[in-house]
Amino acid sequence: MFLFSKLMPREGKFFDLFDLHAEQMLFCAKELQLLMEDLEKGDSEKVVLRTRNIKGFESAADRLTQQTMRLLHRIFITPLDREDIHQLINKMDDVLDLIEDASQCISLYDIRKVPAEGRKLAEICVTCVEHLKAAIGMLSDLKHADPILRHCLEIDRLESEADNVMRDIIVKLFRDEPDTRELIKMKAVIELLETVTDRCEDVANIIEGIVIEYS
């Protein structure tokens, strides 16, 4: 198992790019969590700042995705299957895109409030991304196969938790929110937050497949 891993030809730059991308992903997720807290406090200036910061992190991640794709076309021998590299970096990028979508949705819809439980969803997003970052950081050395898989399993559990939290929030919105327009806007944000965890699970599934294939 480990002998094969040691014999694998490696281009370390790919793993460096994955790590940097995961770092931007975590910056984004944490900024979204702070944005949700600022929204609850009614601090509109900080909400605008957080939205701008998220856009900056997402743009930085886009550049890393482009670097990864250029490297993939230049390198003849890659440390992982080309399709795995392609899928991994693009699914990681999907996570950032959705975080930015959620922040932009709040800004464009001029949302001034969300259910307090919305913060819980943002916290779950951060925890999912933390587990992703940890798993991605170990991906260059598959002697860490077991802890990588444990991180993936935890992401799967968190995605299920987020799904339950989202359903509870939407039930509460339909029960307690009298303004139909506000209900529709808040529901859109909550669904985007839950979808962030779905995309994290997609990344975890790719990582899990890589570990199983190469270890």
Image (cartoon, rainbow, N blue to C red):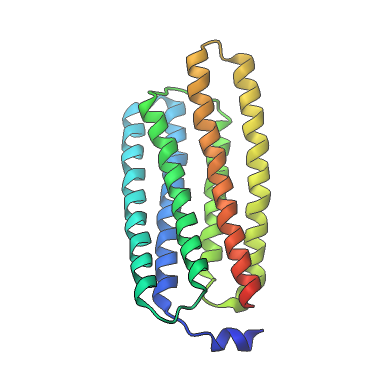
Q: Image quadrant for the C terminus? A: bottom right
**Looking at the image, residue 116 lies above or below residue 101:** above
**Looking at the image, residue 11 lies above or below residue 26:** below
Residue closer to the observer: 41 or 51? 51
Q: Which residue is depicted at the point 41% across and 60% down?
A: 21
- The picture places residue 191, in percent across and down from the top left corner, at 55, 33
- Image position of 121 (left or right of 110): right
Q: Image quadrant for the N terminus? A: bottom right
Q: Which residue is depicted at the point 33% across and 44% down?
A: 55
Q: Determine which quarter of the picture holds residue 39.
A: top left
Residue closer to the observer: 39 or 148? 148
**Looking at the image, residue 25 lies above or below residue 170:** below
> What is the count of numbered marks?
0
Q: Which residue is depicted at the point 32% across and 33% down?
A: 48
Residue closer to the observer: 115 or 92? 92
Q: Specify whether residue 114 is in view.
A: no
- The picture places residue 129, in percent across and down from the top left corner, at 52, 53
Q: Which residue is depicted at the point 63% across and 74% down?
A: 213
Residue closer to the observer: 21 or 147? 21
Q: Specify whether residue 195 is in view.
A: yes
- The picture places residue 158, in percent across and down from the top left corner, at 64, 47
